[in-house]
Image (tube, rainbow, N blue to C red):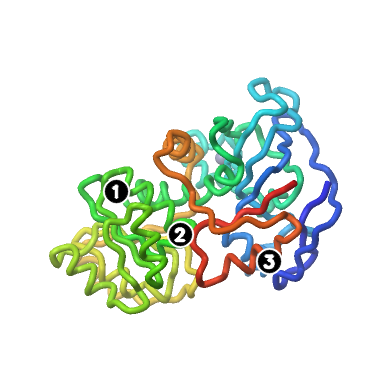
Amino acid sequence: MKAVRFHEHGGPEVLRYEDAPDPETRPGHVVVRVAACALNHLDLWQRKGMDRVILPMPHISGADVSGTVADVGEGVTDLTPGQRVMLQPGLSCGRCAMCLSARDHQCPRYDVLGYRSEGGYAEAVAVPAANVIPIPDHIDFVSAAAFPLTFLTAWHMLFAGGRLTSADTVLVVAAGSGVGQAAIQIAKATHARVLATARGEEKCSRARALGADDVVDSTCEDVPKRVRALTGGRGVNVVIEHVGAATWDQSVRCLALGGRWVTCGATTGFDVALDLRHLFARQLTLAGSYMGAKAELLQAAEGFFRGLFAPVVDSTFPLQEAADAQRRLEAADRFGKIVLVVD
Ligand SMILES: [Zn+2]
C-alpha cells in the first residue's frame, strides 16, 4: 500500500509518500481501507520528536480515521467487508480494572492510534474490532474522520474534568482549535452558557455561529475583565483550555468560586506559576485531561449521528500532500479540523 511515513524526526519535509507493507489481518482485528484521516497536534509532536519517547521507525501517524472495512480477522463476527466506519483512536488492553470501569484511557497499556502503532496516513490500517464504530449513510467520510479525537477529548474535559451542567457557564479558550469547536458545540447542546475566546473578528463570528453565547476577541480585549463583565462579576464555572503558558494567568482569573480549570495541552509552553492562595481560598480545581473513554466517544457519536453537532472542517488535502496539511495545522487563520483524503 501507499502511506505517508517519516524515517527520522524533523520538519514537515521528513514526511514521505511511499510504499509500505500492507497491514495484517490478525485474529480479533479489522483492516480498514482509509477514506479520510484527520490531523491532530499529536502528529506534529510525533514528527518533531518528544523527550523520552521512542517511536517505531519508519512511522505512520494518524489517530482519526474513517473508511470501509476491507477484511475481518478470526473471531470478528459483527463486522463485514464494505461496512462504512470510523475508528476509536484509543487502544487499550480491554482486561484491566481501568478498561473494565470505563476508564480505558487510564489503562497502563493505553496508546493512541498512530503513536506507537501504525496510524491512518495510509491506504489501510489495522485495529482491534473494539475500535470500530459503524457510521450511518448520511455521515460523510471527511466529517467522520474529523470527529473522534477532538469530540472525545472535549466531551471528557467538559463532563469528567469540568463536571459541566446546564446551570454552568463555561469559557472555551481558542474557539478555532479542534477541541475548541467541539467543546462549544457539546456545551451548547448541554444548555450551559458558553463563552469563548478567539483571535480576530472572523474567528469570533464563526464561534458565535457554532453556538457561543458571547465571544471575547483576545487580540484586542482584556479577557478576564470582559468575562467578569459578562458574568455579573462572578466569573465562569469551567474553563476549557489547551493553550498553556500564554493563557494560563487569564484563564485562572476568569474562574468563579469553586471553578474548574481543565487542560489537555500546552501549545505555547509548559511552565506556569500558581499562587496557592487562589487555589484554596477560591476553592478551585485544576484537572489534567488526556483523551477519554471509549464509552464517552460512543455517547458523543450519538449526538453526531443525530445532527446535534458536526465537526468543523478547515480544509482537506490529498494524502500525498500531508506535509502541506501539517503546515496548515500551525497556521494562525486555521478554524477547525484539517483532513487528509485518500483516493
Ligand atoms: Zn487495560
Q: Secondary structure at mark 1?
A: loop
* Mark found first going from the N terminus, 2 or 1: 1
> Front-most of 30 and 201?
201
Give the quarter of the image for residue 209: bottom left
Q: Which residue is mark 3?
A: 324
Q: Which mark is residue 164?
A: 1
Q: Residue at x 48, y 63 (%)?
A: 265
> Front-most of 110 and 229?
229
Closer to the eye: label 3 or 1: 3
Amino acid type, mark 1: Leu
Q: Is residue 203 rendered to the left or right of residue 313? A: left
Which residue is farthest top? 77
**C-alpha span from label 2 to label 1:** 16 Å
**C-alpha span from label 3 to label 1:** 37 Å
Residue 179: give x, y in percent of width and height.
46, 56
Image quarter for ligand 1:
top right
